[in-house]
Amino acid sequence: MVRLTAAQAMTRWLAAQYVSAPEGDLPFFAGVWAIFGHGNVAGLGEALHGMGDSLPTWRAHNEQTMVHSAIAFAKQSRRCRAMVCTTSIGPGALNMVTAAALAHVNRLPVLLVPGDVFASRRPDPVLQQIEDFEDATVSANDCFRPVSRFFDRITRPEQLLVSLPRAMAVLIDPALCGPATISFCQDVQAEACEWPEQFFKRKVWRIRRPAPDREEMDGLVAALRDARSPIIVAGGGVLYSGAERQLAGFAEKAGIPVVETQAGKGSLAWDHPFALGAVGVTGTSAANRAIETADLIIGMGTRLQDFTTGSRALVDGGRCRLVQVNVQPFDAAKHSALGVVGDARLVLDELNTLTEWRAASDVSALKQEWDVACDAATAAPGDREALPSDAQVIGAVWRNVADDAVVVCAAGGLPGELHKNWRTRTPGGYHVEYGFSCMGYEIAGGIGAKLAEPQRDVVVMVGDGSYLMANSEIATAVAMGLDLTVVVLDNCGFGCINRLQQACGGEPFNNLWRDTRHEVMPSVDFAAHAASLGGQARKVAGIEELEVGLAARGRGVNVFVIETDAMTVTDAGGAWWDVAVPEVSASDKVAMARREYERHVARRELGEKS
């Protein structure tokens, strides 16, 4: 037995957890992000200091964005490794809730350890404590319950003997994967007891690969043999399973086109003969035409959210058969699909044994047509005086980064333009958070991606709106000595939602700076701001100057600011998205948009019933 505080026991146990990986056994927890306050500095702070390099601790500037960094690390590590985040009680803890929801939606592992009130209740109410008049057991950390895959509150030290392994089992499970929250009462953190030494022995966890059920697999094979024009929708599960080689082989061997979700982009290299690119609302014309004419859709590791399915219009169940391959039964059963519960790589291994069968698909013309459209959208503008589009900035970045570069982005219009126009060359080269569409993920996400794969060039693309929401982690990246490139696209507001507002018949209102209620029109010097945080920053006058700067950038955090056109988007591609338009309005524009909306809804319902 060994005598330790509960916080010391937790940190020692975390450092002893390893994961089996192709390159050998690795620590599962790569480190801890910590912002200390009265609820965790004395207990966990002392314990983490004692761990040194065996469980390194980094300081961030915002609790939400430090969790974003941890989540991005897990995503870029293909869910094989994770990080820990700890805060004090009160606002520090609650700042992590949004990021917890992001991890929950995207099925990504992160261990959250917010401090909590005194279990003894001796000094109640303590600083930052939430008091419920009817339930004395409630604390602010109960907000984590609906956005955690596992939740526990530690009110006695010995509870860690059960709670920590249970949390780890969730974090390492491909079907249950998501955020685990251990709410740690601050007095308990400092309380000591006797611990069995066996509890701290190194343990190597293995990420399981669920094999598909034989009958379900037979159903998939039979559906393929009956199909004339099948198509595969590659989701994040392909990359997390490490199945991109098997997917590429099967697509080529069987002649099946592959389209990609935001999470699955990069499953195939962009120039693979059967890669048709992005699907859905932000999809390519090639991908969406192919899925509209398919008689069998195979979802491979995707949760089929509405941007992927065109609000179900592209995957309606009445027009064609749908098979869902997923490790999570919840996802495998969506949209009345034939479910195949199993690991994507194991399923594709079996499909690659099929003989004497090939689809009748010929997608070369579709692919070529989109390549021409993408070239046109991303080419440098002929008019050097005009503001460039997002797509033109994307083209400039793509032309000036390494083949294995990682592009990082999140909410707004950029993810749609990237989904269509970023030509992913290597797996893991596309890192866009669009499951929760969370503004402020971008710069912090770039840090996490760089920590996961320090040898790769990481480029963050972020709009001015997201930059203003969460920019302080530039200082963190500088302090950590990271090489990171940040491209800030300034369209003077929330350009994406401004366009959506007008597409729904609304007048420009409260999105672009010029359409807000203001006394003084803001003029933000983003380059000066980034430089004040330690970045090497400059504002460029256009695409040509951006390309020169990107080609010449050196070590450290490089920030480029470029003004862009808020209204121009890539016309080619796309699919309808169900955004409800007001049924009654005094505006003729809204009434017209409502009639158009009703036509789309009727068309979709007709397709579902046919």
Image: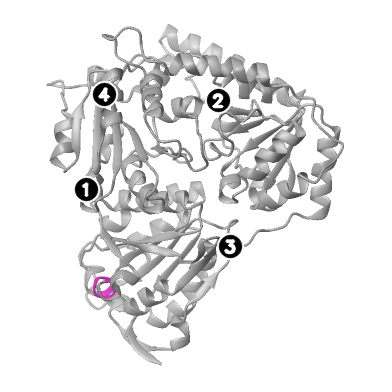
Q: Viewed as shown, does residue 230 lie left or right of 131?
A: right
Residue visible at 60% across and 17% down in the picture: 368
Mark 2 and mark 4 lie on one chain; the one further toward the N terminus is 2
Residue visible at 28% across and 10% down in the picture: 384
In this view, which residue lies farthest toward the bottom?
Answer: 1
Write down the residue under mark 1.
478
Residue visible at 29% across and 36% down in the picture: 486
Q: Nearer the viewer, residue 413 or 132?
A: 413
Identify the secondary structure beneath mark 2.
loop
Write down the residue under mark 4.
562
Write down the residue under mark 2.
283
Residue 352 to residue 5: above or below = above
Give the spatial CA distance, label 4 vs label 1: 21 Å
Give the spatial CA distance, label 3 vs label 1: 34 Å
At label 3, counting other C-alpha atoms closer than 10 Å, the crowd grade (few under 14, some 14-19, many 20 or more) is: some
Q: Position of residue 133 (x, y in %)?
A: 32, 63
Identify the secondary structure beneath mark 1.
helix
Give the spatial CA distance, label 3 vs label 4: 43 Å
Do the residues bearing badges 4 and 1 touch, measured as CB atoms within 8 Å? no
- The residue under label 2 is which amino acid type? Gly
Write down the residue under mark 3.
207
Number of numbered discs on residues: 4
Give the spatial CA distance, label 2 vs label 4: 26 Å
Which one is in front in this view, the residue at disc 2 or the one at disc 4?
4
